[in-house]
Amino acid sequence: MRYNEHDLDSRERALRASLAELGSVLVAYSGGTDSTYLLAVSLDELGSDRVLAVTADSPLTARAEVALARTQAEALGARLLVVRYDSLSDPAVVANGPDRCYHCKRDLFHSLLDIGRQQGLAHVTSGENADDQHDYRPGRRACAELGIRAPLAEIGLTKSEVRVLSRQRGLPTWDRPAAPCLATRFPYDTALTAEGLARVEAAEARLQGEWGAIPLRVRDHFPLARIEIPPDEIARLARPKARALAVRLLRELGYVYVTLDLAGYRMGSLNEVLAHTESH
C-alpha cells in the first residue's frame, strides 16, 4: 500500500504536538513496533529526562520479549525500568475468561500510574494504535477507565502507518510481527498456570528455531498442540521431515497430539469461538 507522505508527515507533527502538550510521560514499553515508535518520538520531543520506558516482566511475557525491550530501549537511549509483575496473582487473570485482558491491564496500569507519580511524570501512555479500536481488546476499557493516554490512536495512526513511519526513522522494529502475551495461546476459561505458559513459550521457540522467523502460534489445548503457520507455508512444513521434527520437539515438552491448523496463522484465532457463540 502506498501512503501520502504529506499526510504521514502531518500525522507525525500532530503526534509531536500531542506529546509536547503532555509534558512528560511514562511509556508502557513492550519493545514492539508501536511502543518503540512512540518511545522514539517521545524522546525526540520531550528528552530523556522527561520520558521513562517501563517494561513489565510477567509470566505472560516471553523471556525473549523482555530481552528485546531492553536492547531496543538501550539503542534509543531511553531510561528503562523493568518491573516484575505477577499477573498470576489475580484470580480473574488465572481464570482466563473473555475479559482476562481487562483485569490484567487494570492491575498493570494501576502499578504504572503509581510509578509515574513517584517519578514525577504527568501521564502514562500506551502504544495502542487506531486499528486496535476495531479489535476485541478488553484491555482498552481498563486503560480508558484509568485515564491512560494512547497518543498513536488519538491522532488516528494505524498499524501500517506506524510501520511506514518507523521504517523512515530506521527503527529495526518497523516490520516486527505482533507478539501478544502468552495467555492468548490458551482457549478462554482454561486456567493459566506458570507451567502451561512456559510450555507454550518453549514450543514456539523450538519451532521458530527450526523453521525460521515465520509468524507462528502454538495454541495450547493440552495435551494437544494446534500449530498455526502462514497458509503459504503449510505445504512445505507438512512434508514428512518437517512434520516429524515438529512432533518430536513438542512431544518432548509433554504434548501428546500435534496438529497443523489448515486455516493458517491469524491473529486472535481463539476469539473466533466468541463470535460463533454470539451468532447462536
Image (cartoon, rainbow, N blue to C red):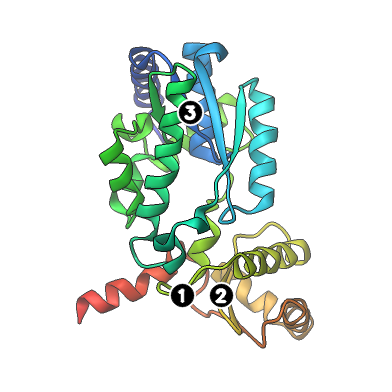
The foreground one among 1 and 206 is 206
**Res. 220 mark:** 2
Front in this rendered view, residue 266 or 150: 150
- Give residue 190's mark: 1
Q: Is residue 194 above or below residue 107?
A: below
Q: Which circle, 2 or 1, is nearer the viewer?
A: 1
Task: Please tell me which of labels 2 and 1 falls first in the chain.
Answer: 1
Specify the label residue 115 is tagged with.
Answer: 3
Residues at circles 3 and 2 in contact by the CB criterion of under 8 Å: no
Q: Which callout, 1 or 3, points to the residue nearer the camera? A: 3
Mark before the other along the chain sequence, 3 or 2: 3
Quarter of the image holding residue 17? top left
Regarding residue 276, the answer to whether it shows in the image is: yes
Horizontal relation, residue 10 to residue 57: left or right: left
Q: Would you call the spot at circle 1 few (<14 residues within 10 Å), some (14-19), or many (20 or more)?
A: some
Q: Is residue 42 depicted above or below 33 in this figure?
A: above
The three-letter amino acid code for the residue at tag 3 is Ile
Amino acid type, callout 1: Thr
Q: Secondary structure at mark 3?
A: helix
Contact, mark 2 vs mark 1 (Cβ under 8 Å): yes
Q: Secondary structure at mark 1?
A: loop
| Badge 3: residue crowd in 10 Å (few <14, some 14–19, many ≥20) | some
